[in-house]
Amino acid sequence: MPSISRILVLFGVAVVSLADSWGPAFSLGPTSPNSAVIESFTTFIPGKPPTNPQDALFLWPGTSNATSGLIQSGADQLRDQKAYCGANATSWCVSASYFGVGGQKSGPLVPVDGNTPIDIHYKLASDQRTWDQTVTVNGKVISTLQSFDGPLIQGGWGTGTECQSNCRGTISTQTYKNTKIILSRADPDFKNTLGVGGGVQHTGLTTPDGGKTWTVTQITIPPYTAP
Ligand SMILES: *[C@@H]1O[C@H](CO)[C@@H](O)[C@H](O)[C@H]1NC(C)=O
Ligand SMILES: *[C@@H]1O[C@H](CO)[C@@H](O)[C@H](O)[C@H]1NC(C)=O
């Protein structure tokens, strides 16, 4: 299922096997070497899942650097959603998740309807090592996970539309609202690292504090058809 390609896609160097493909993305990074990604917030609305589920589709906002694991809470669709998380055909399986040395680790997988806003928060703890992922729906925390990469020096943040094996793509627009990415130190050039795939729209990057905090009010990712 998951592969190393999840880590590399943030920097546009996707290494994928033949049957896997990636939809267009919004991606930022790397930060300058004296800065790091230390926190992010976004509200993710995945849209309706494909009506003919296949193995496997993964939609997520991710953060990593070139040598860390990938923090990637998100919405999944496998062929058998019922077996995967008890979801029906109109729902996603949503969890906090991490891919790194040792493979994929996920918090509880919970069924979530397609047009439900999912609040996703990633935060480096005060020990400067532990990352806490918190996934909240309708004010209730549904999934959490910890990983241990430390401040993501030369880190990036981006969206993933990851289509593996028999996946045919997505049928809905994905929306990310009120995205906020916090760096350890101001990096005014961070905005210049933005890469935007075909059909991806956004309202622009702004910073209220000279480049430590970056915000984007809305990002939309168009429906994607796998080749
Ligand atoms: C599918 O599951 C979702 C989430 O649990 C639920 O809200 C919805 O009512 C279900 N739909 C059907 C047709 O059972
Ligand atoms: C990624 O972040 C870790 C933790 O701070 C750091 O040790 C590593 O050097 C960083 N990788 C790169 C490529 O900067």
Image (tube, helix red, strand yellow):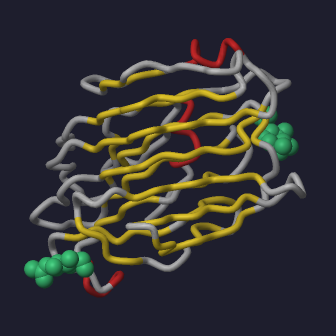
Pick the residue in front: 34 or 18. Answer: 34
> Image quadrant of residue 79?
bottom left
The location of residue 186, given as percent across then percent down, is: 77, 21
Quarter-wise, where is residue 38 in the image?
top right
Spot the residue most to the right. 127
Quarter residue 76 falls in: bottom left
Residue 155, percent from left and from top: 69, 35
Give the residue at x 28% y 44%: 174
Total numbered circles: 0
Q: Could you tell me residue 133's position as x and y percent? A: 62, 62
Question: Ligand 2 is located in which of the four quadrants?
Answer: top right
Q: Is residue 167 left or right of residue 129?
A: left
Q: Is residue 185 left or right of residue 61?
A: right
Q: Residue at x 22, y 57 (%)?
A: 115
Q: Check the picture and name the quadrant holding the N terminus.
A: bottom left
Residue 80 visible here: no
Quadrant location, the C terminus: top left
24 on left or right of 130: left
Counting from the top left corner in percent of width and height, residue 181 is at: 61, 36
Side of 6 relative to 213 (left or right) = left
- Of 47 and 167, which appears nearest the observer? 47
**Residue 36 in view (yes/no):** yes
Q: Residue at x 54, y 19 (%)?
A: 206
Q: Where 26 sits versus 62, above or below?
A: above
The residue lying toward the viewer, choosing from 194 and 142, is: 142
Q: Who's the residue at 46% across and 73% down the image?
A: 140
